[in-house]
Image: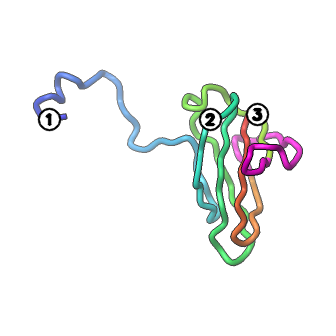
Amino acid sequence: MRTRDIDVYKGSYKIPKKSGLLKVKGGAVITSIRYKQSSWEIRMFNPMNGTIESILELTSYKVMLKKPQYYQKVNLLGEPVSEPQKIRNQKINILLSPKEIVTLRLY
């Protein structure tokens, strides 16, 4: 877009200075987020040499289409490896062992 085009394409809405699907605290690194079979899969890993606790905070439901109520650990093929857990206060607390890769399904 060129400077002279701004007035032509400028809308009456405000775009937030920052936004996103989720916030991550505690040292985990998100490597993949995808929408699959009416749910979100979030893959993360612990790059540290020790165990860490990370917190995923869901921040935008407009992008997610619906507010997820549960999460479940799945393997790299998307097959469940744990029981479903309730998402509380839009936050997911997860322990990651050193160098561990974890994939969560949110639905």
Q: Quadrant of residue 69?
A: top right
Q: Earlier in the sequence, mark 2 or mark 1?
A: 1
Mark 2 vs 1: CB contact within 8 A: no
Residue named by callout 2: 35
Is residue 58 placed above or below 102 in the rendered structure? above
Task: Name the residue located 72 percent from the left edge and 56 percent from the top edge.
Answer: 102
**Magenta stretch: residue 91 in it?**
yes
Mark sitting on residue 2: 1
Residue 85 located left or right of residue 33: right
SS for callout 3: loop
Q: Could you tell me residue 89's position as x and y percent?
A: 73, 41
Residue type beneath disc 3: Gln
SS for callout 2: strand
Q: Quadrant of residue 50?
A: bottom right
- Give the foreground label among 2 and 1: 2
Q: Closer to the camera, 79 or 33? A: 79
Mark 2 surroundings within 10 Å by alpha-carbon count, few (fewer than 14), some (14 through 19), many (20 or more)? few
Dominant secondary structure (helix, strand or loop) of the stretch shown in magenta = loop
Q: Quadrant of residue 25?
A: bottom right
Q: Earlier in the sequence, mark 1 or mark 3?
A: 1
Q: Closer to the camera, 84 or 35? A: 35
Mark sitting on residue 79: none
Residue named by callout 3: 69
Task: Name the residue located 17 percent from the left edge and 22 percent from the top edge.
Answer: 8
Magenta span = 73-92
